[in-house]
Image (spheres, helix red, strand yellow):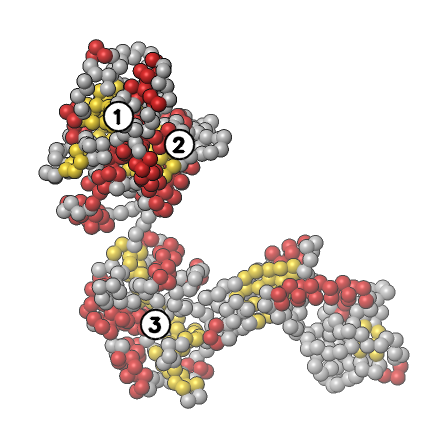
Amino acid sequence: MILLPYRRIVVNNSNNLVMGSRYFLHKPSITLPSIHKSTIPVLFQTQRLIFTTFASKPISPNGGTSSFSYRPQKFPPPVSGVMLEDPAEEIAESEHVMALKQKLSQIGIDIGSCGPGQYSGLLCPMCKGGDSNEKSLSLFITQDGHAATWTCFRAKCGWRGGTRAFADVRTAYAEMKKIGKVNKKYRQITDESLGLEPLCDVLLKYFSERIISRETLRRNAVMQRRYGDQIVIAFTYRRDGALVSCKYRDMTKKFWQETDTLKIFYGLDDIKGASDIIIVEGEMDKLAMEEAGFRNCVSVPDGAPPSISDKDLPPVDKASRIILATDGDPPGQALAEELARRLGRERCWRVTWPKKSTVDRFKDANEVLMYLGPGALREVIEGAELYPIQGLFNFKDYFAEIDAYYHQTIGYEHGVSTGWRSLNQLYNVSRDSSYTVGVCGLPIGFDNDGKKVVPGELTIVTGVPNSGKSEWIDALLCNLNHSVRWKFALCSMENRVREHGRKLLEKHIKKPFFDVRQFFPLSRTCLFDAQKYGESVERMSAQEFEGGKKWLSDTFFLIRCEKDGLPNIDWVLSLAKAAVLRHGVNGLVIDPYNELDHQRPSSQTETEYVSQMLTKIKRFAQHHSCHVWFVAHPRQLHHWVGGPPNLYDISGSAHFINKCDNGIVIHRNRDPSAGPVDQVQVCVRKVRNKVSGTIGDAFLSYDRVTGEFMDIDEHPSKG
């Protein structure tokens, strides 16, 4: 035996105390000879206990009892009087342990007598051990006492974490990270050790009322157990025929399980080698499935837990079809989603429980068995549908929508009239012999085949500058609001808010916003401008103006970037989504394309960027059933001779015409010799859905006084 220098062993003869180096005391199997009490002087008084090396009863090598002896013990019971000689080292370790204990106590973990380097089972402060008050929290304190980790092994809890005594104990923290999982030892149980016995007549009657037969109970080894004067149901969990766990249920539907036993799926032996497997949420549902003729069924052990680990999943490697028949409530649906994610959605199917009433559905398999019988339960399982995979659909998923489309009961999905008869032949979709008068005195009806404005579509509007693109869209919005009360989000970056409000109010009230002659009565030039703007039409009254303001507030919602930076398309669509959800808007106007921020990665071409941007807009339109008008200017026309441009002239990319649902060119005559200068040509250059309309041109007359667009035969004659 070798002793470290300057670390003496000191024995107190009054109570058989040993003092010395902790390194010495950690040496394997050392036995000290018997020493007479009278030969050892008392060198130290008692100090606070740090650790002990004694067994409960001293044992000498010869088998007899001596005054003291040492033998290593894995979990030595505490005895007084063993201490380190260095008080400074003792105090340093105490500070870490005390700090760690204080931190753990603040989160509800009472370490009590838990020692460093040991695993301890405690009551979890989060789940309180469930109904059985199980000590399911495993706490580990590092050997140096500087850090601790913990995990709750209850399936419905799973709380875990770790902490350190001080911030600078990195070596202990590294040790804490390296702590491996505990190989938990499970209890070996049998029917006899648990006191299980066959079901009594009372419980047999209980199951009979739930349409569970005696034979099904016998085959699944459902038993009972006595707790004092109470008898509870015992669902035995078996693997390869051996009992590995047991779950109990009393008459008040209170559940608890045997502690320290392996958790497996109930009925695990019934799915060995099965190609079709049914997974339910409770033991009663598993028994109900057997009554309907399905033995290839298992139940999850803990109902619908918040999470499932891979080790909890049943062995389904050979299964090609997994039917998820979990409960119909939200936790059950969440369980089905998690099981499908872990087991693979491509081989999962799901059941839809039949209706119990006009509102509610049956909750689970046992309810269906009790009220509708085994035949109905069998039909439910045989009618299971493929589990939905995001992005992969079947036409039958849309039959309800297709039926409504055929029977014309889908509402605005058929579209809304533009408000112009000449354009309805191109921009209108349905038939109706009636029409109403629009806000500008325009016929808003469905009297001709043509195209309507359809929710969920993208319309690209272009035209040379000063052709009236924005004015025409504003007039269209006014018509749609008057006919079907649509609301709109406006991202019109070229318009000042007050100017845009004036234009919309003039179209709505059909009167000019100003009486310009009052401002410039003496100027011939200004008088000429006033006559062109206001002519002899009376200005809107203050009362009409106040009513118009309320209409503006109720109908339009502005998307504007008040900062110096330019908005990008993602910013616009995020606010448009908020407008849909908050205000119920039906249309979005983005005017124009070149006012947005179009920064893109250096590796992305403009064509690729435009394609991606238009895809985002179309997805927004379809997802929110919101029609989007996107104004885009044509590129510079070097050899323009005055005719309308086409959609391929839009600056940026041919994707503007390739990806839009509708393409419209607005063109105004600028040559008095070629026709009236107030005539506007609406060129429908693309219609993706042939049922929605067709390609062609429509001519409208623009009233500069009120900003109205009218059919040619509706415009009042001049002079």
Which label is found at residue 537? 1
* Residue annotated with mark 2: 497
Q: Between marks 2 and 3, how big is the CA–CA gap?
A: 66 Å
x, y percentage for residue 434? Answer: 12, 39
Inspect this view and state whether residue 428 appears: no
Q: Between marks 1 and 2, how big is the CA–CA gap?
A: 24 Å
* Quarter residue 11 falls in: bottom right
In this rendering, position of residue 697 left or right of residue 364:
left
Q: Amino acid at mark 1?
A: Val
Question: Which label sits in the foreground, 1 or 2?
Answer: 1
Q: Residue at x 39, y 82 (%)?
A: 232
In this rendering, position of residue 652 left or right of residue 477:
right
* Quarter residue 33 falls in: bottom right
x, y percentage for residue 701? Answer: 21, 23
Question: Mark 1–mark 3 contact, CB under 8 Å?
Answer: no
Question: Which label sits in the foreground, 1 or 3?
Answer: 1
- Camera-side residue of 518 and 427: 518
Q: Secondary structure at mark 2?
A: helix
Q: Quadrant of the C terminus?
A: top left
Q: Secondary structure at mark 3?
A: helix
Decide which of tag 2 and tag 3 comes sooner along the chain.
Answer: 3
- Crowd tier of the residue under label 1, counting other residues whose Cα lies within 10 Å: few below 14, some 14–19, many 20 or above: some
- Camera-side residue of 543 and 116: 543
- Crowd tier of the residue under label 2, counting other residues whose Cα lies within 10 Å: few below 14, some 14–19, many 20 or above: few
Q: Quadrant of the N terminus?
A: bottom right
